[in-house]
Amino acid sequence: MTNLTRDSLAVLAALKSEEEESRVRAQYEAERAHARDGDNGSGGGGGGAAAAEVRCDDEQPWEVCVRTHHDAWIVLRRNRGRELHTVLGKADETLMECHNLMQWFSERSFGGIFNVD
């Protein structure tokens, strides 16, 4: 059981790191586009739209499900600026069953704030 936990936590940490890097990269690109629009004399409207797009992308609900080598599911969900990280110890479920289980868990435990549908 210890190996399952360590493996699952390692996968979870790697996914979290990748997600953070992609978020920082998107924010950096949006800021560069904002600066480029400002340098072109297009006024403040174009840059504000780029910054708003980053906020909208950050608010979009998403889910990542990964199956580990030790038959566990790692599930990351983000919705409305909140994150839910879950390790499901049995990977005998299909991806759809895993998704449905997470929907049920979100409804029952958190009032549906992590639902991504």
Image: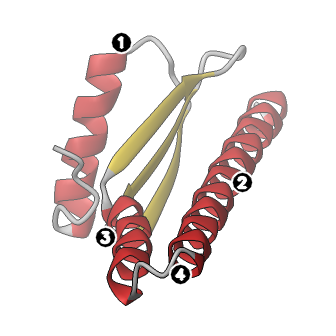
Using a 10 Å C-alpha cutoff, classify the residue at mark 4 as few (fewer than 14 neighbours), some (14 to 19) or many (20 or more). some
Residue 18 in picture, x, y percent from top left: 70, 45
Using a 10 Å C-alpha cutoff, classify the residue at mark 2 as few (fewer than 14 neighbours), some (14 to 19) or many (20 or more). few
Marks 2/4: CA distance? 26 Å
Marks 1/4: CA distance? 49 Å
Which residue sits at x=18%, y=58%?
108
Closer to the camera, 36 or 67?
36
Disc 3 residue type? Arg
Question: CB of mark 3 within 8 Å of CB of mark 4?
Answer: no
The residue labelled by disc 1 is 94
Question: CB of mark 1 within 8 Å of CB of mark 2?
Answer: no
Sequence order check, earlier mark of 3 and 1 = 3
Sequence order check, earlier mark of 2 and 4 = 2
The residue labelled by disc 4 is 38
Q: Could you tell me which secondary element the residue under label 2 belongs to?
A: helix
The residue labelled by disc 2 is 21
Marks 3/2: CA distance? 19 Å
User: How many marks on residues?
Assistant: 4
Q: Could you tell me which secondary element the residue under label 4 belongs to?
A: helix
Question: CB of mark 3 within 8 Å of CB of mark 2?
Answer: no
Q: Residue furthest front?
A: 41
Residue 54 appears left or right of 24: left
Closer to the camera, 35 or 63?
35
Residue 79 in picture, x, y percent from top left: 32, 62
Closer to the camera, 103 or 14?
14
* Above or below for 79 versus 16: below
The residue labelled by disc 3 is 80
Question: CB of mark 3 within 8 Å of CB of mark 1?
Answer: no
